[in-house]
Image (cartoon, rainbow, N blue to C red):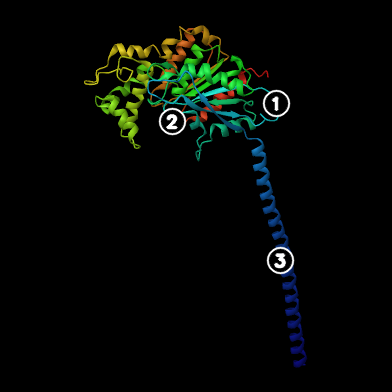
Amino acid sequence: MIINSFTKQANNATNLLHDRKAIATKKRKRHEKNKSGFNFLLCFLRQFIFVAKDLLLFFRAMNRGTVVVKTIESEVLKNNKPNDPNERELYVYLPPDYEKDSTKHYPAVYVLTGFTGRGKMLLNDHAFTPTLAERMDKLIAENKIQPMIVAMPDCFTYYGGSQYTNSTATGRYEDYLIEEIVPRVDANFRTIADRDSRAVVGKSSGGYGALIHAMRHADTFGLAASHSGDCYFDYCYLPDFPKAFRAIKGDPKKFLEKFWGEEKKGKGDFDAFNIIGMSACYSPDENEPLGFSLPFDLQTGEIIREVFERWFEHDPIRLVEKHADALRSLKLLFIDAGTRDEWFLDIGAKVLINRLKQHNIAHIHEEFDDGHMNISYRFDRSFEEISNAVNRKS
């Protein structure tokens, strides 16, 4: 009886062991099946991601504009006093659909760079900021703006810039833009060649250039946008006079030779270079060795009022009344500045806006919480306004 009971318990244990083994085998097979299915799904997802990436790159390429480089041999820049080259590169952005329809014409935007800048710099690669071409692609892809042609001229000089004006000390850069660049772009690309489909935009000195050309050449540019453009010279330039005086040390020629001769610039060098550059544009003087007069005495630093007064003749604040009719004719006048601008150009913009209001000149004025540097994101706003206002007829 005892043996039978033991045998029965042993059989039960054996059966239980077999059952557990069977259950474990089923679980293992089910796990292996699930694992196999998971691996298949994982493999499928990986392949899908690779294909999706390829498709994304393909569609991005399909929706990417083209940058064309033209070499321009300028007649008006020949024999300039600093002996700067008269052969210049012009970079032109063409929208993604430019080659798809040879009958379609586009509005054109001329983008002017700031002091020490040139058109090519707008295409510099940066980890956190898109190039102007990438910015245009994105804005067009998101339907925030219509496709447009963008021209990026080079108006750089030995003195750091031209302010996009004519000067005996630098050259005829105003004529270069109006008489040579615009006609060349219209002749070589399918622009809508009229002022209501042509805009001028710039930042800092480029913003100044946009304002000046809107005033003097409203027959060429029917739309203008100035981002932190130089204006109200009392505030934006005067504080740098003593800094420039100290850096120049009584000899602007020697300073310039040192500035160009050394890759690393000293403290205050750019303050001095900026004031020298503005002097070359605003107070040219063919009787001076360098072709311009500085607005302060080189020995004492005292401001030379008659020279500084010549600068004011170029201040947009002082030019509004003279060019009020031209400004009123614009389809768009967009002005902005950061409320922490280091050159107080937000204040200058307020003064300028007040002048515009006094003469019933339509405009858009915006402020934003930022300084003067690294504000290329503001091009999004000006291009949106240009796209809304420009003549779309092709």
The Cα–Cα distance between marks 2 and 3, rounded to whole angstroms, is: 60 Å
Q: Residue 138 in the image: state x and y as whole percent.
A: 60, 33
Q: Residue 281 in the image: state x and y as whole percent.
A: 39, 18
Residue holding disc 2: 373
Q: Seen in the image, is 363 located left or right of residue 25?
A: left
The Cα–Cα distance between marks 2 and 1, rounded to whole angstroms, is: 39 Å
Q: Residue 291 in the image: state x and y as whole percent.
A: 33, 18
Q: What amino acid type should be assigned to the residue bearing mark 1?
A: Ser
Label 3: element kind: helix
Q: Seen in the image, is 124 located left or right of residue 79?
A: right
Instruction: Give me the residue at 60% from left, 25% from top.
Output: 149
Name the quadrant of the C terminus. Answer: top right
Q: Residue 375 in the image: state x and y as whole percent.
A: 48, 30
Residue holding disc 3: 31
Observer able to see residue 336: yes
Q: Nearer the viewer, mark 2 or mark 3?
A: 2
Q: What amino acid type should be assigned to the residue bearing mark 2?
A: Met
Up-down: is 123 above or below 41? above
Tell me, yes or no, whether the two marked residues, 2 and 3, touch with CB atoms within 8 Å.
no
Q: Earlier along the polypeptide chain: callout 2 or callout 3?
A: 3
Query: Which is nearer the eye, 14 or 234?
Result: 234
Residue holding disc 1: 102
Q: Earlier along the polypeptide chain: callout 3 or callout 1?
A: 3
Tell me, yes or no, whether the two marked residues, 2 and 1, touch with CB atoms within 8 Å.
no
